[in-house]
Amino acid sequence: MNKLKGSIETLSALQLTQDIQWLDEQSKTVLHSKEVLAVILQGTIEEYKGYSRKEIMEFIEIDSIDDAKEVSVGRTNTQIQGEHAEFVQLNEKTSRFDMVFRAKNPALSDENVLFSLHVDIEPQKTYRPGYPIEKRGIYYLARRLSSQLSLITEKTDYKQLEKCYSIWICRDDIPPKARYSISFYSMANIENIGENTALPQDYDLMSLVVIKLGEKDYKGTKEDPEYELLHFLNIIMYPHKADFMDEISRYIDFSENEELWEEVTGMEGLGQCILEEGIEQGIAQGVEQGIQAMILDHLEEKVPREKSIAKLQKHFGLDEEEARRYYEKYGVGNQCP
């Protein structure tokens, strides 16, 4: 197995999610780690078959994960970047991608030309939110694809369109027979009458991947298809067990990072404190990102102000004054019309 060298940032993100009892906003911070993304992409992206996780890490375009950009029907050439990219039009309910980024498409790129894959990762607490997750995934793909072009005119160059992936990781409320399964959906040429010369790269532009977990204890074996991915997601998507560091080290090896171990002490498991000031600041930033994301999600779902403030106090250990200050900071100006 190709182990990845673990970074301080990844360890900080994993520490932040150690005690999650449900899929909260803080837990999504770990998906910003390139090491974590590399494991997920290796098991879900067709174009990455045969590539090592280290190579896949290098494919991920770092800058595309940084900032959130608005995407609207009227301005679809706006870049989608960061963990809370959104698309919105007048009188439309604001929707946000949990995390979107670009990564190199090695099947089409060469020394002179870079083609990208546009990836959306959506961690979900429930597989049964009241509508089919698959339909929502297809809708997100359509918006992600259309966002690559500016206002359509007679001169629009459709050759610019690049392939989009939407990867949904559903944790709970999975039908028993579907637990720990992965479903792949894509566009395909299913029939031809007469000769067809179209290349797959010209029509296979949207792929949906739905990963269904469902139980805290994964009973799969190494002989099972996609065992590595499902086992890895089981480790990071549920509250961490006592053997967490041993299990995660099968994928991401922190022991080989000498700089890391000079800065982290007393590590008997993920429950120990990370002592360095820089790492503590990183965790604090991750918490604030989680607070911001929860507020924006509550606004999208029209959660009443006082209930949202109460939830902030409960889930982030804030007093009422702190919760109200955060709500004013991130809530004002973001209310849906």
Image (cartoon, rainbow, N blue to C red):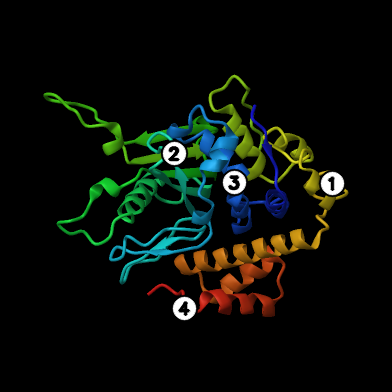
Q: Secondary structure at mark 4?
A: loop
Q: Secondary structure at mark 3?
A: helix
Q: Residue furthest right?
A: 266
Distance between the alpha carbons at the discs numbered 4 and 2: 34 Å
Q: Residues within 10 Å of mark 1 (few under 14, many from 20)?
A: few
Task: Give the vertical position of 252 relative to 279 (above or below).
Answer: above
Q: Residues within 10 Å of mark 3 (few under 14, many from 20)?
A: many
Is any part of residue 173 visible from this angle?
Answer: no
| Sequence order check, earlier mark of 2 and 1 | 2
Question: Residue 134 at what x, y percent from top left?
Answer: 39, 43
Measure the C-alpha gap from mark 4 to mark 1.
Answer: 42 Å
Tag nearer the camera, 4 or 1: 1
**127 over 71 or under it: above or below:** above
The quadrant of the picture occupied by the C terminus is bottom left
User: x%, y% of residue 51?
Assistant: 52, 30
Disc marking residue 267? 1
Whether tag 4 and tag 1 are in contact, CB under 8 A, the answer is no
Query: Would you name the residue on which mark 4 appears?
Result: 333
Q: Amino acid at mark 4?
A: Gly
What amino acid does circle 3 point to? Answer: Lys
* Residue beneath the point at 28% across and 60% down: 150
Residue 113 is labelled as none
Of pointers 3 and 1, the one earlier in the residue sequence: 3
